[in-house]
Amino acid sequence: MLLLLIVYTALDADKPVQVDFAAKAEEAGVSVEHLRAEVAWLVEHEFLALDGDVDGVARVWVNPSVGFLPGTDPRIAAARHSFPYFDIAEGGMSAAEPVVVYPYKPELWEAVYNAQQDLFEDPPVFKRCSAHAM
């Protein structure tokens, strides 16, 4: 979770995030190997997509169902890496499988966008977060 927070706070529009493994590992208080293992797990489970890793610096893309900036069009962002859509199961954390993963389908992301357009255009979290106050 810490890694996702580090990546989310580095988002800039709809661009990849540069992850300097040595710097971010020090920031998180973990080893570089541990951080690389976390990135690998997040990539394997499609929370992130890895786009190159040169000299200890990687470019990662974030699945818009788990992190995005206001104004991000999730349909375009999801299509870039065929990201699945993650949703909370009925019953939340008490459910046997608390998260439902829907495989990538353009029409699903279209429906998500249409149903939550106000959330993608002006997420309430940015209004409460002093780091992202407008």
Image (cartoon, grey):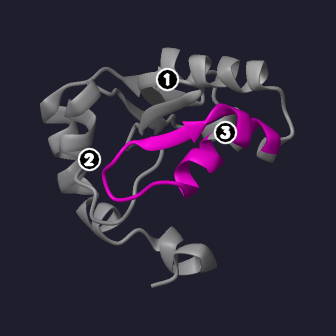
Q: Nearer the viewer, residue 93 or 16?
A: 16
Question: Where residue 95 is drawn, which disc sits there?
Answer: none
Q: Which residues are magenta?
A: 4-26
Q: Which residue is mark 1?
A: 54
Q: Of callouts 2 and 1, which one flags the residue occurring earlier in the amino acid sequence?
A: 1
Front: mark 3 or 2? 3
**What secondary structure is marked by label 1?**
strand
Question: Where residue 3 is drawn, which disc sits there?
Answer: 3
Front: mark 1 or 3? 1
Whole-angstrom CA distance, mark 1 to mark 3, is 19 Å
Q: Nearer the viewer, residue 105 or 36?
A: 36
Question: Where residue 74 is drawn, which disc sits there?
Answer: 2
Left or right: residue 23 compared with residue 105 = right
Q: Quadrant of the N terminus?
A: top right
Q: Is residue 45 visible?
A: no
Q: Of callouts 1 and 3, which one flags the residue occurring earlier in the amino acid sequence?
A: 3
Whole-angstrom CA distance, mark 3 to mark 2, is 21 Å
- The extreme bottom residue here reads 134
Left or right: residue 42 compared with residue 67 = right
Whole-angstrom CA distance, mark 2 to mark 1, is 27 Å
Count how many numbered circles sit on residues in the image. 3
**Quadrant of residue 81 within the rendered picture:** top left
Report the amino acid beneath label 3: Leu
Which residue is pictured at 26% across the width and 24% down the height?
Answer: 82
Q: Residues within 10 Å of mark 3 (few under 14, many from 20)?
A: some
Which residue is pictured at 34% across the width and 64% down the height?
Answer: 119
Q: Nearer the viewer, residue 70 or 26?
A: 26
Q: x%, y% of residue 71?
A: 27, 64
Check if residue 19 falls in the magenta segment: yes
